[in-house]
Image (spheres, rainbow, N blue to C red):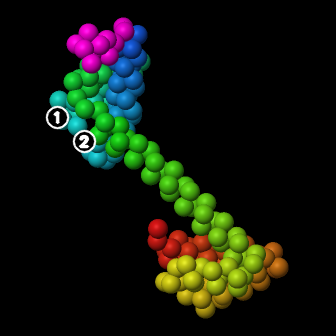
């Protein structure tokens, strides 16, 4: 590859530069929106952290906030933003993972209440920490509550038991 070919590859149009700058500002805005505990988990140097903390104190409706976001974007141009992006993605993904686990446990509970022993056998096989006798007892109580139109106390206990004993 000749030197002129390399220069063509390194060349970025003004539009590309503006888009990159805008993306960095958006990343900075996500940092500003984080709570203090989540912000502490993000790997960044002290100068960038100070700029983010200052932006949190500025009234969002004022021009100073927009300028501070631009400044954060400018600071991020000179840094490797990949670790920051990965940490943000991880924080956002934890919520989705927790929701998915919750729905999975709800589905297991509903299936256990509806079908009984086959589901209990499968769960005991998959998760050895689960007690077959305890699940059968809770299943019988849940069935009884359903037939008598009582509140689903045992179904809630099944959910809590599964939540406590299924580790993934």
Tell me the number on the disc at residue 110: none
Residue 36 is at least partly visible in this image: no
Residue 9, x across and y down, in percent: 32, 16
Query: Are the residues tagged 2 and 1 within 8 Å (C-beta)?
Result: no
Q: Nearer the viewer, residue 81 or 42?
A: 81
Q: Nearer the viewer, residue 123 or 9?
A: 9
Q: Nearer the viewer, mark 2 or mark 1?
A: 2
Q: Is residue 27 left or right of residue 143?
A: left
Query: Would you call the spot at circle 1 few (<14 residues within 10 Å), some (14-19), or many (20 or more)?
Result: few
Task: Determine which residue is flagged by label 1.
Answer: 46
Residue 116 is at least partly visible in this image: yes
Residue 75, x across and y down, in percent: 23, 23
Q: Which residues are magenta?
A: 1-14
Residue 157 lies within the magenta run: no
> What's the CA distance linking mark 2 and mark 1?
10 Å
Residue 3 lies within the magenta run: yes
Relative height, residue 103 to residue 121 (above, below): above
Secondary structure at badge 2 equals loop
Q: Residue at x 53, y 71 (%)?
A: 163
């Amino acid at each position: 590859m000749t030197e002129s070919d390399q220069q063509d590859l390194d060349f970025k149009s003004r539009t590309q530069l503006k888009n990159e700058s805008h993306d960095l500002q958006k990343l900075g805005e996500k940092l500003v929106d984080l709570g203090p505990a989540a912000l502490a988990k993000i790997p960044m140097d002290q100068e960038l952290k100070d700029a983010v903390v200052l932006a949190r104190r500025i009234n969002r409706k004022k021009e100073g906030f927009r300028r501070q976001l631009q400044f954060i974007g400018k600071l991020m141009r000179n840094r490797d933003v990949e670790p920051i992006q990965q940490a943000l993605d991880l924080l956002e993904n934890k919520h989705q993972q927790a929701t998915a686990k919750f729905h999975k446990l709800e589905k297991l509970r509903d299936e256990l209440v509806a079908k009984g022993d086959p589901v209990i056998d499968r769960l005991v096989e998959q998760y050895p920490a689960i007690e077959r006798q305890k699940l059968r007892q809770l299943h019988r109580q849940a069935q009884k509550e359903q037939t008598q139109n009582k509140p689903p106390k045992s179904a809630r206990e099944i959910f809590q038991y599964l939540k406590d004993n299924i580790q993934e």
